[in-house]
Image (cartoon, coloured by chain):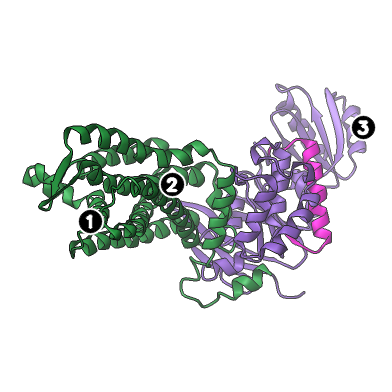
Amino acid sequence: MSNPLISARGLTKKFGDFTAVNGIDFDVYKGESFGFLGPNGAGKSTAMRIIGATSQRTSGTISILGKDPELHGPQIRAHLGVVPQQDNLDMQLSVAENLYIYGRYFGLPRSFVKGKVDELLAFAQLEEKRDAKVETLSGGMKRRLTIARALVSEPEILMLDEPTTGLDPQARHILWDRLFRLKEQGVTLLITTHFMDEAEQLCDRLMVMDKGSIMAEGSPAALIKDYSTKEVLEVRFGSDRNQEMADKLRTMCDRIEELPDRVLMYTEDGEALLEKIYAANLHPKTSLVRRSSLEDVFLRLTGRTLIE
Amino acid sequence: MAVAIADARAGKRGERVYSGRVPQLLERGFIAFKSSTYMIVISGFIEPVLYLLSFGYGIGKLLPTIAVGGESIKYAAFIAPALLATSAMNGAIYDSTMNVFFKLNHDRIYHGMLATSMGPLDVALGEIGWALIRGFSYACAFMAVIAPLGLVESIWGLLAIPAAVLIAFGFAACGMAVTSYMKSFQQLEIVTVVLLPMFLFSGSFYPISVFPEWLQFTVNLLPLTHAINLVRGLCLGNLELALIGHALYFVVMIVIGLFFTTKRLNALFMK
């Protein structure tokens, strides 16, 4: 493979006694969509801010396009489009003005930015809101505007910190569609998320993070293959009986996880397992066979669920 | 293109904190200004005019002239320069405290700005630059009121306009530095608590020679006293060496204010 765009070794960030990022190594290559998956507080956003040259590492090395962000902040940021976790649009300006002035912050000429504004309004499906004040937009629209704004400088790397947190399902799908298009255009995407469906949808390669460390790395499919079984059988016996039943179920499959409301059974064939359970005269109140997901990977790696 | 623009600045002095984007920040100021509430803008101009009308006319009736440095001048001509200096201060402080605090902590606009290829010094200079443009406009407008009224005794009074800009720069730089350390809106009230007595005691309405010596000494340390002395000296045509001293006071304020603002913004955004 060619040289990585971003390369980190032993990257560490401490805030006083608290270690937010604990000696992580990773490489991101051109054109790929790379995700940091982990619960809140896993250190994803901190890692993103270090890459975005807006936070200084405590130790370790990081190079972005061959440069150290600590020494060449403005030059590195010229390559990046940043979508922060919390929208920070300019409330005093209109939708189009937000895009325009952001392009100007990069030092881009007026004529170039003006053309770009029209293009991005179309991309973000906000043409009708062109002259509206930002505060009148819905959450999904604000998010799309923030993404459009990050694209005004035609960045090679687009960094998205929790891009769809707080959006309704429809708004999420519109946003995912826009991000897919960017990926097709060859933009390198860096995404943090605590939604496993988002990670599965958007990311070619993932780093599963917990408490500042990397737990595993690979493509979503490979992670599922390596850390989980093909299928999962979810059974519920009622909250007071789940644990008691779990002991009986344990011997029937590869691995089980007890959650407060249900028992997860890991197996290659969910239906067959369910038949076995019925044959053993155990009668769950509800049952569900599904494919393994990244949620199961995370559970396996940390013993906890992603969203707590 | 953004990359080529940023790379062109490689190796220049202060490249880590400054990218030469002050004009772009001023452009933002103008765009936002076009749709802003005109009352806030107008009030900055009206306030000194109201003071001039009420005190200049009212007290001027009781006290037609006042003795300054051996000569007697009209009372209104005595307070007009002080009001000019004070409005420069107030405008600069409003822009660099309330406005900046809101953008920093509530709208988080600076976070967005600093995710681009700009640096914190661009933001600091841009915001202060905007405060200066406003200060300059107010000074011109106020001058256009007091000059026809015969309240500017000397042609040197024209220099009171750049002096007002210098004063605004000093206050804006320090105001922004202080604001960047503030954690809540309530803390900003401290600014008002400091400004009002300064306005009342810095020789705006009467010469500070009426005070006992210890109070004169204290008042002479305050920035507004120097601002008023500078503008008054120019308006009255009393050119003395002390004027340079007053101007230098503000140069020092600018340097200190910019130093702490940049340092603090760097710390805030490079956490």
Q: Quadrant of the N terminus of chain A?
A: bottom right
Give the residue at x 84% y 25%. A286
Q: Residues within 10 Å of mark 3 (few under 14, many from 20)?
A: few
Of the chain colours in the picture, the one used for chain B is green
Under mark 1, the amino acid is: Gly
Question: Is residue A169 rendered magenta in the image?
Answer: yes
Under mark 2, the amino acid is: Asp
Q: Are marks 2 and 1 on the same chain?
A: yes
Q: Nearer the viewer, residue A262 or A125?
A: A125
What residue is pinned by disc 2?
A: B95
Give the residue at x 27% y 61%. B247
Q: Chain of mark 1?
A: B
- In this view, B154 is above or below A165: below
Question: Which quadrant would residue A291 be assigned to in this image?
Answer: top right
**Residue A275: assigned label:** 3
| Residue B62 shown left or right of residue A7 in the figure | left
- In this view, A113 is above or below B182: below
Under mark 3, the amino acid is: Glu
Q: Chain of mark 2?
A: B
Q: Which stretch is magenta?
A: A166-189
In this rendering, does residue B258 appear at all? Answer: yes
Q: Which chain corresponds to the colour purple?
A: A
Question: Is residue B5 rendered magenta in the image?
Answer: no
What residue is pinned by disc 1?
A: B233
First in sequence: mark 2 vs mark 1: 2
Give the residue at x 81% y 50%. A122
Task: Give how far apart the Cα atoms at labels 2 and 3 are.
Answer: 73 Å
